[in-house]
């Protein structure tokens, strides 16, 4: 593999800028710039020199193949954090035949060298994109290999079951049906149950990763935009007295005690005044129905029950104008009731998050669903068919960790990575 380099720290001024060089021979390249570095994983304070003289004083270290993130020999140059220095050192490396890495190329090499599997790479992508505590925790679980370890355990169940089936097949006597040992069905039951547990917790994990959605719905002038603004504590939606102002859907994403939650301000649900507004209303209804939760906002308590779903919240608006009815109420003018409302929303979502799985991507749940359906076997099936089902399930597990079919996904995943990762 050729030598690549990239700035590992964000571009711009800072205390330190780190350039990473990876590929076998990167130590030799670095030594031509800074002199000998006898020991791996030792930091050396060195002068970087070119023909014109001193370029920078840097902390330099190298990692042998098996010790590095990529699995190839890697060097880190900790430079002073100035773009001009990074550029200059980049030129020096280019002169040595080292090329600038593409987005995600370091991670791609880690995958090729077997240092990370596909699920860990997905986890790493999620970790880099994480905005909230719950996203960080979930991403850390997959990026640190929790799903990979589960897949390994599931694979060992299949291997044991497969071996037992194979040994029960009597190839000499084709007339007598083979007796598949009961242990095979116990193992496959366990496999089935464990996969089902992950599949059941997928929806919650996916919400943690992508964020929960709360639609604020109610008649025009109920105070939907004002509530959104109050939540945002800044102006994100247009507030006006003219009914039908909010034609489109305005989205506000917040970190609600560690959960990513998007609030949607929808067009007033009423009879449309014109066709443009009609489109807005229809879109609002659809989006509101698909959200995880709806706040039915109304100053009078009259709500559109056709959109009601379990856990939904009926909330009285403009409580500062009274009279206040029992239940949830909020005043966007004074802020009264807002904390209680947010707390209630948080508890609904934290209950839903409690059984979240480790799998949080479509691709992962599809592979697991495939593997689970493959082992739908029964004792009256011929042993050969059971053996084949077990092989199919193993193939789906290979897909889960990217032993097969990874290429289709890697490009998509790496498109969101930065250069240097
Ligand atoms: P929407 O059509 O449901 O989005 O309603 P708006 O947020 O645009 O509010 C409609 C009108 O009600 C505006 O004049 C707001 O200033 C007013 N309003 C909204 N919330 C409150 C509130 O909590 N108290 C009072 N007094 N007025 C409010």
Image (spheres, helix red, strand yellow):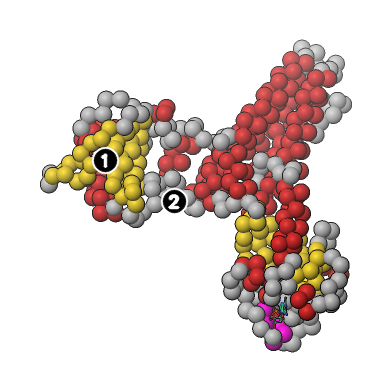
In this orientation, does residue 313 appear? yes
- As drawn, the residue found furthest toward the top would be 172
- Is 419 left or right of 326, judged from the image as shown? left
- Is 167 left or right of 304, judged from the image as shown? left
Q: Tell me residue 212's x, y (percent).
A: 69, 57
Q: Residue at x 81, y 62 (%)?
A: 312
> Residue 418, labelled with which disc?
2
The quarter of the picture showing ligand 1:
bottom right
Tag 2, which secondary structure? loop
Viewer-nearest of discs 1 and 2: 1
Give the dominant element type of the magenta stretch: helix, strand or loop.
loop
Comparing 338 with 115, the one in front is 338
Q: Tell me residue 174's x, y (percent).
A: 81, 17
Spatial distance from mark 1 to mark 2, Cα to Cα? 24 Å
In the displayed structure, 212 sits above or below 184; it is below
Label 2: how many Cα within 10 Å (few below 14, some 14–19, many 20+): some
Q: Quarter of the image containing the C terminus?
A: top left
Q: How many numbered callouts?
A: 2
Boundaries of the magenta span: 242-247
Is residue 2 highlighted in magenta?
no
Q: Tell me residue 348's x, y (percent).
A: 77, 54
> Residue 191, labelled with which disc?
none
Tag 1, which secondary structure? strand
* Mark closest to the chain's N terminus, 1 or 2: 1
Judge: label 2 CB < 8 Å from ligand 1: no
In this orientation, does residue 398 appear? no
In the displayed structure, 123 sits above or below 296; it is above
Residue 280 figure quarter: bottom right
- Is 41 left or right of 376, judged from the image as shown? left
Q: Residue at x 81, y 77 (%)?
A: 322
* Residue bearing the label numbered 1: 58
């Amino acid at each position: 593999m050729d030598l690549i380099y990239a700035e590992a720290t964000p571009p711009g001024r800072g205390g330190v800028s780190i350039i990473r060089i990876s590929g076998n021979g990167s130590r030799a390249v670095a030594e031509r710039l800074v002199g000998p570095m006898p020991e791996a994983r030792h930091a050396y304070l060195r002068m970087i020199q070119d023909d014109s003289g001193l370029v920078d004083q840097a902390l330099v270290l190298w990692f042998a193949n098996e010790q590095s993130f990529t699995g190839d020999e890697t060097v880190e140059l900790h430079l002073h954090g100035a773009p001009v220095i990074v550029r200059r050192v980049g030129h020096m490396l280019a002169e040595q035949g080292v090329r600038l890495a593409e987005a995600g190329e370091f991670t791609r090499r880690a995958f090729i060298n077997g240092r990370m599997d596909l699920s860990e790479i997905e986890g790493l992508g999620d970790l880099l994109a994480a905005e909230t505590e719950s996203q960080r925790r979930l991403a850390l679980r997959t990026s640190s290999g929790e799903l990979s370890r589960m897949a390994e355990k599931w694979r060992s169940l299949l291997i044991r079951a497969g071996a037992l089936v194979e040994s029960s097949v009597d190839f000499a006597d084709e007339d007598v049906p083979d007796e598949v040992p009961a242990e095979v069905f116990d193992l496959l039951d366990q496999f089935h149950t464990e996969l089902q547990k992950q599949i059941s917790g997928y929806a919650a994990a996916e919400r943690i990763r992508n964020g929960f959605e709360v639609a604020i719905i109610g008649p025009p002038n109920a105070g939907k935009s004002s509530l959104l603004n109050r939540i945002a504590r800044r102006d994100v939606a247009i507030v006006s007295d003219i009914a039908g102002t909010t034609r489109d859907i305005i989205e506000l994403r917040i970190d609600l005690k560690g959960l990513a939650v998007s609030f949607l301000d929808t067009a007033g649900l009423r009879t449309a005044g014109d066709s443009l507004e009609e489109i807005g209303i229809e879109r609002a209804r659809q989006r509101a129905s698909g959200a995880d939760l709806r706040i039915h906002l109304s100053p009078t308590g009259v709500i559109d029950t056709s959109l009601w779903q379990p856990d939904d919240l009926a909330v009285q608006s403009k409580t500062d104008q009274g009279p206040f009815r029992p239940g949830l109420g909020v005043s966007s003018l004074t802020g009264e009731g807002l904390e209680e409302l947010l707390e209630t929303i948080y508890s609904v979502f934290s209950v839903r998050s409690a059984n979240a799985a480790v799998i949080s991507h479509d691709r992962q749940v599809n592979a697991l669903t495939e593997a689970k359906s493959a082992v739908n076997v029964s004792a009256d099936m011929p042993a050969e068919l059971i053996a084949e089902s077990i092989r199919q399930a193993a193939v789906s597990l290979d897909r889960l960790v990217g032993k097969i079919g990874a290429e289709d996904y890697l490009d998509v995943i790496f498109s969101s990575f930065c250069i240097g990762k």
